């Protein structure tokens, strides 16, 4: 028994000074002291050598020895685990993150960006202006006097306290503001929201979006207008789409035209979407009226220019196969989330 106590003393010393270098040396420690064939078990196996009256106190010594080994093992394990990052309460930084649901762009924004991108490649820069506008910038400067009949085509919402303040009916107001602000050459594209006092239906709404363009310089001709829009259509709708210009009327352009593209669905054969004509109207355009240039302090003898304006919703309806324009403004997530990744 003396021999056993001496051994316990020695091992106690060994345990006290032990520190594990790594998981491997800690495991060696466990096997040596606490394993099935370890020292604690081995010494306990020698209990039969201990005289009966000493058994109790020897048992207590042995228990204390065992607890010491266990405690050392647990402490060292925590330390080693913390270093190697395997502890249960340490987050596992190698796990994949919690996925965040990603939002998506609104289809009108997607279409607007596509339109703007194409014109930016032709060196048009984006210009923006107010949605709440005065009569001058929305109508009068655009050759639409107070009593001009063409105002009827663009009825809008007025402030009851001041009818000279209104919601803009087109982004042409930005063109006026830019012509007042800078000297030619001017090459701008004006995206934005516009308003019209119209009955809401599947095909029209009291607010929608436009992209208008303006190019003013010396010697700008209708041929430049055609070529620019032709490039746009090819980039936007592909090479097999045809275009045609129809004479039209806008007070701020002379001559004026509507531009149609061959129907994307029936390729010109005639279907319900193109009302059996084979053509889809997508924009209005023309050479800027000399009166408009003059209103903005630009000499019409020296400068000419072209302008065009298109809606954003119409091509978005065509591109994404949407049949009701009201869906764009209902803010229904089930509709909107279909455009993620488009
Ligand atoms: N401003 C016109 C509209 O909103 C579109 C247009 C712009 C037509 C420029 C010709 C030239 O209807």
Image: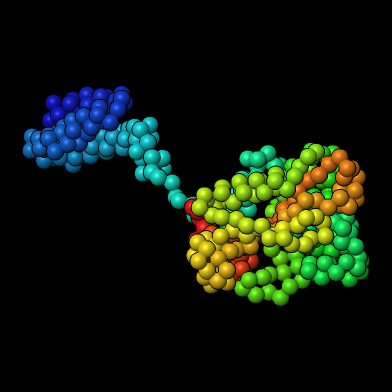
Image-based side of 111 in relation to 73, left or right: right
Q: Residue furthest left?
A: 48
- Residue drawn at 80 percent across, 51 percent down: 288
Residue at 31% over, 25% down: 21
Q: Nearer the viewer, residue 233 or 278?
A: 278
- Residue 268: image location, x then y, percent: 52, 63
Closer to the camera, 30 or 288? Answer: 288
Q: Quadrant of ligand 1?
A: bottom right
Q: Is residue 131 above or below residue 216?
A: below
- Picture coordinates of residue 14, whole percent (x, y): 25, 24
Indicate whether 76 appears above or below 90.
Answer: above
User: Where residue 270 sits in the image (x, y, percent)?
Assistant: 52, 69
Q: Is residue 197 left or right of residue 103?
A: right
Q: Quadrant of residue 27?
A: top left
Q: Residue at x 28, y 31 (%)?
A: 23
Q: Is residue 21 above or below residue 137?
A: above
Figure colour scheme = rainbow
The quadrant of the image that shows the N terminus is top left
What x and y, as percent, mark residue 37? 12, 35
Which residue is drawn at the image coordinates 65% and 40% (left, top)?
122
């Amino acid at each position: 028994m003396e021999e056993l106590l001496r051994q316990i003393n020695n091992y106690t010393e060994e345990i006290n000074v032990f520190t594990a270098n790594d998981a491997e040396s800690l495991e060696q420690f466990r096997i040596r002291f606490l394993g099935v064939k370890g020292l604690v078990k081995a010494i306990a196996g020698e209990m039969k050598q201990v005289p009966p009256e000493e058994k109790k106190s020897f048992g207590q010594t042995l228990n204390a020895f065992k607890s010491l080994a266990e405690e050392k093992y647990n402490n060292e394990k925590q330390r080693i685990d913390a270093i190697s990052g395997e502890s249960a309460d340490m987050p596992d930084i190698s796990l994949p993150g919690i996925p965040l649901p990603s939002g998506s762009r609104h289809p009108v924004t997607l279409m607007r960006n596509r339109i703007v991108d194409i014109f930016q490649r032709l060196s048009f820069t984006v210009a923006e202006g107010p949605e709440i506008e005065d009569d001058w910038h929305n109508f009068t400067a655009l050759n639409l006097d107070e009593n001009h009949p063409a105002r009827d085509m663009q009825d809008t919402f007025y402030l009851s306290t001041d009818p000279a303040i209104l919601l803009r009916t087109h982004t042409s107001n930005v063109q006026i503001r830019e012509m007042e602000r800078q000297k030619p050459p001017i090459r701008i594209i004006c995206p934005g929201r516009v308003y019209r006092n119209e009955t809401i239906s599947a095909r029209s709404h009291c607010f929608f979006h436009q992209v208008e363009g303006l190019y003013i310089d010396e010697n700008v001709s209708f041929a430049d207008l055609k070529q620019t829009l032709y490039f746009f259509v090819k980039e936007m709708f592909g090479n097999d789409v045809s275009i045609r210009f129809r004479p039209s009327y806008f007070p701020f352009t002379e001559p004026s035209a509507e531009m149609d593209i061959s129907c994307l669905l029936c390729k010109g054969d005639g279907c319900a979407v193109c009302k059996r004509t084979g053509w889809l109207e997508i924009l209005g355009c023309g050479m800027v009226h000399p009166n408009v240039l003059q209103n903005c302090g630009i000499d019409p003898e020296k400068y000419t220019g072209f302008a065009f304006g298109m809606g954003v919703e119409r091509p978005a309806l065509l591109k994404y196969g949407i049949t009701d324009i009201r869906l764009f403004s209902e803010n229904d997530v089930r509709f909107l989330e279909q455009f993620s990744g488009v």
